[in-house]
Image (spheres, rainbow, N blue to C red):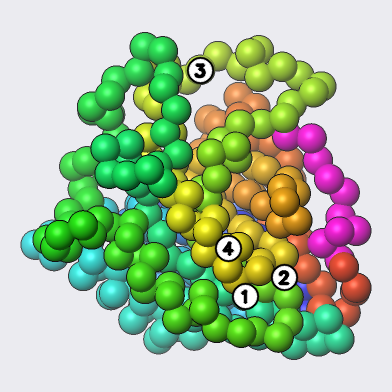
């Protein structure tokens, strides 16, 4: 069984849904796909695309991203989160740890997550940006994400970290591939481009500081407690393939068509990214390292 990574497919955009529809119906029948969030905020569309992926892959893993938790009814985002988990159970889409069996077995461990904003604690990935709008007035989560009262000293990020506690403290006995939607480290925000300076790209959102809503350093603490060999994530719409302190971090986002057209999302090609092969020793290390 091969294991592939993908995120941020945003199927509300017709060209993205077509990209999913164009995935082979025969090439991945014995394989697994990790989908690291942001498919759609509409539950019926989410059901549809997960079914499409189940038709193509033997196993599908999923965690909700921020778009999934946009609540446009009387329910709050945490209620919607649990409805999504229920939907996944009904489709046999994994939101719990699962073993990929083979000569070189690996556990896939989903990590629920949210971002910590700079005023919420030291685990924020925030870095100042000149000319930014500190109020994030263009950030859609401010209008559509609705949280219940978590109580004293609890925010969405710490709530989801607590949900991961049992799976993080568990002993697995095989290499671990973990995944989250949000970024676990600040350094992953930035590329390491050598062939082309990032300064050649015009900032499409000069007043938006992504680091305010990028992720949470506590995710990386959980990755380290798990002893993950590989961690898959999404959210940023920038692709990465980078080893840091013995963990391979992989982001393989579909993103938006305009981002692909303008060169912000690279190394996408026409399929998800291979990260593990249960019949090939150290398959992840045999894959070519890209310079992002």
Decide which of 12, 97 is in the foreground and name it: 97
The foreground one among 15 and 86 is 86
Name which of mark 1 and mark 3 comes first in the sequence. 1
- Please tell me the numbered disc located at residue 203: 3
In the displayed structure, does residue 144 sit left or right of residue 22?
left
Residue 223 is tagged as: 4
Horizontal side of residue 195 vs 95, given as left or right: right
Q: Earlier in the sequence, mark 2 or mark 1?
A: 2
Is the N terminus in the top left, top right, bottom left or bottom right quadrant? Answer: bottom right
* Above or below 21: residue 54: below
Provide the residue span drawn in magenta.
283-292
What is the spatial separation of the Cα atoms under label 2 and label 4, in whole angstroms?
18 Å
Mark toward the viewer: 1 or 3: 1
Q: Which mark is residue 1?
A: none
- Tell me the quarter of the picture where residue 39 sits: bottom left
Front label number (2 vs 1): 1
Q: Is residue 101 left or right of residue 143?
A: right
Q: Taking 164 as reference, is 152 above or below it? A: above
Query: Which residue position holds label 1?
Result: 108
Query: Is residue 267 something one can see in this rendering?
Result: yes
Given residues 192 and 172, the one toward you in this image is 172
Image x and y of residue 168, in percent: 51, 75
């Amino acid at each position: 069984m091969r294991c592939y990574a993908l995120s941020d497919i945003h199927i509300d955009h017709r060209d993205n849904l077509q990209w999913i529809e164009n995935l082979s119906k025969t090439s991945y029948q014995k394989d697994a796909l990790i989908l690291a969030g942001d498919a759609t905020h509409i539950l019926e569309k989410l059901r549809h695309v997960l079914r499409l992926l189940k038709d193509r892959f033997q196993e599908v893993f999923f965690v909700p991203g921020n778009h999934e938790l946009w609540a446009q009814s009387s329910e709050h985002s945490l209620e919607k989160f649990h409805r999504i988990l229920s939907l996944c159970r009904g489709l046999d889409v994994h939101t719990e740890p699962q073993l990929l069996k083979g000569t070189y077995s690996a556990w896939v461990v989903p990590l629920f997550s949210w971002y910590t904003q700079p005023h919420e604690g030291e685990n924020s990935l925030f870095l100042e940006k000149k000319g930014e709008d500190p109020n994030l007035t263009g950030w859609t989560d401010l209008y559509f994400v609705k949280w219940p009262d978590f109580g004293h000293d609890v925010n969405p990020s710490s709530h989801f970290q607590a949900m991961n506690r049992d799976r993080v403290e568990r002993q697995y006995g095989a290499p671990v591939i973990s995944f989250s939607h949000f970024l676990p480290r600040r350094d992953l925000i930035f590329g390491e481009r050598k062939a082309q300076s990032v300064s050649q790209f015009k900032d499409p959102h000069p007043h938006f500081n992504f680091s305010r809503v990028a992720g949470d350093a506590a995710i990386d603490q959980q990755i380290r407690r798990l002893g993950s060999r590989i961690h898959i994530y999404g959210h940023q719409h920038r692709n990465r393939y980078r080893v840091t302190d013995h963990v391979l971090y992989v982001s393989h986002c579909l993103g938006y068509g305009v981002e692909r057209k303008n060169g912000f999302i690279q190394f996408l090609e026409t399929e998800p990214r291979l990260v593990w092969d249960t019949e090939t020793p150290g398959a992840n290390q045999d894959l070519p390292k890209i310079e992002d």
